[in-house]
């Protein structure tokens, strides 16, 4: 089964926040590698939509929520098989990162 992968606006903004955090705190190269790693982790989802573990905290919802982990980031995936789409919905920032 092949689905279309959509990045929600929220997921894109979180990815941008992650990039900016590491860009200013560490370096541009580290920020690029981290963001590339997160994106690369999701590439196979079009062909393997059920990749990842089920998200137990969201099992009461109608959609099927799964997640992938890359380093200290959790990538939450919601699938809607009827519409043949897969949404990457959120990134949870690691506990050590705080906004100023």
Image: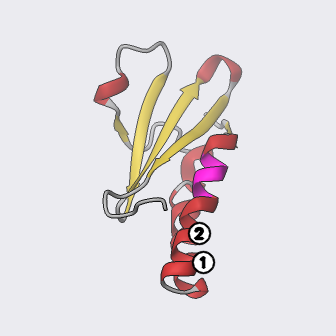
Q: Considering the numbered disc 1 on the image, is that residue within a helix, a strand or a loop? A: helix
Q: Is residue 79 left or right of residue 64?
A: right
Residue 32 is marked as 1
Question: Magenta region, mostly helix, strand or loop?
Answer: helix
Judging from the image, what secondary structure is the residue with disc 2 in?
helix
Magenta span contains residue 5: no
- Locate residue 57: give its quadrant: top left
Name the residue rendered at 58%, 79% in the picture: 23
Mark 2 vs mark 1: in front: 2
Residue 60 can be seen in this image: yes
Q: Residue furthest front?
A: 100
Q: Are marks 2 and 1 in contact (CB under 8 Å)?
A: yes
For the point 58% across and 86% down, the residue is 29
- In the rendered image, the quadrant that contains the N terminus is top right
Q: Which region is colored magenta?
A: 11-15
Of 1 and 29, the residue lying toward us? 29
Q: Is residue 13 magenta?
A: yes
Which residue shows up at 47% across the image and 59% down it?
A: 99
Q: Which residue occupies 60% across, 70% down? A: 20
Q: Decide if residue 34 is on the left or right side of residue 3.
A: left
Q: Residue 51: x and y, percent?
A: 44, 43
Is residue 88 positioned above or below 93 on the image?
A: above
52 relative to 8 in the view: left or right: left
Residue 93: % across, % down: 42, 55
Cα distance between the residues tagged 2 and 1: 7 Å
The residue that disc 2 covers is 19
**First of labels 2, 1 by sequence position:** 2
Would you place residue 76 above or below residue 74 in this image? above
Label 2, residues with CA under 10 Å away: few <14, some 14-19, many ≥20: many
Q: Is residue 33 visible?
A: no
């Amino acid at each position: 089964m092949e689905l279309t992968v959509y990045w929600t606006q929220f997921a894109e903004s979180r990815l941008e926040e992650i990039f900016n955090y590491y860009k200013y705190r560490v370096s541009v190269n580290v920020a690029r590698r981290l963001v590339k790693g997160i994106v690369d982790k999701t590439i196979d989802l079009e062909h393997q939509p059920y990749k990842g573990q089920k998200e137990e905290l969201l099992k009461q919802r109608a959609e099927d929520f799964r997640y992938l982990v890359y380093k200290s980031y959790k990538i939450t995936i919601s699938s809607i098989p009827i519409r043949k789409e897969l949404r990457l919905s959120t990134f949870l920032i690691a506990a050590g990162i705080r906004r100023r």
